[in-house]
Image (cartoon, grey):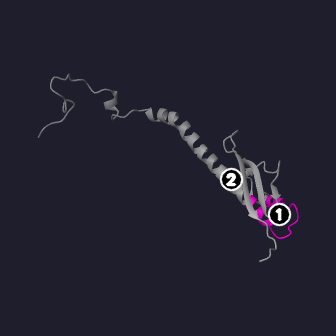
Amino acid sequence: MRQRGPIAGRRAGEPVRPPGLRERLGGTDRGANPVELAVVMPVIFVLLFGSIQVAAWFVARSTALNAAQSAVNAQRVHQAPPGAGEARARRFLTAAGGWLVGWDSPGPSCVTTAADVTCTVRGRSLSVVPGVDFPVRQSAHGTVERWTTP
């Protein structure tokens, strides 16, 4: 039976050296993991919070679009009173939560002509990362209900 020791696996002519600290500790890089983690964690946090911020922007866009569509549906009804669309959009945004912020400063707006109506909702996305928010502007369009002759 062949004996394996510190010389086993050595090339011919290579000097024999005593086992160093790394070999005595099992060949591991002790202390390297915390240093690697300290270098990588800021990048992981930026990616994590950045993706959450982008998701909040998409939810804010969806909320604004749904409010605009709701306003168009209220304003396009036959003989709808002026301001019915804006009032419906305000009720929707109040009930929708805080995903879209700053929507009440200009407020939702609807432009009605004889044939169609366009409603626009503006605001900003909820800020997950301090100081970072994206503008949101969504519009919806529809035809006004009216009597026509065949």
Residue on which the image places disc 2: 61
* Residue stretch rendered in magenta on the structure: 67-91
Mark 1 is on which residue type? Ala
> Is 85 contained in the magenta span?
yes
Near-viewer residue (92 or 127): 92
Task: Give coordinates of residue 83: x percent, y percent.
Answer: 86, 60
Quadrant of image for the N terminus: top left
Which of the two discs, 1 and 2, labels the residue nearer the N terminus?
2
Near-viewer residue (85 or 10): 85
- The image quadrant of residue 96 is bottom right
Quadrant of image for the C terminus: bottom right
Residue at 88%, 62% (x, y): give it: 82
Image: 35 above or below 105: above
Task: Give coordinates of residue 89: x percent, y percent.
Answer: 79, 59
Left or right placement of residue 15 versus residue 45 in this view: left
Residue at the farthest left position: 1
Residue on which the image places disc 1: 114
Give the Cα separation between the discs numbered 1 and 2.
28 Å
Residue at 16%, 23% (x, y): give it: 13
Task: Give coordinates of residue 134: x percent, y percent.
Answer: 69, 44
Image: 108 above or below 72: above
Residue at 12%, 38% (x, y): give it: 2
Q: Secondary structure at mark 2?
A: helix
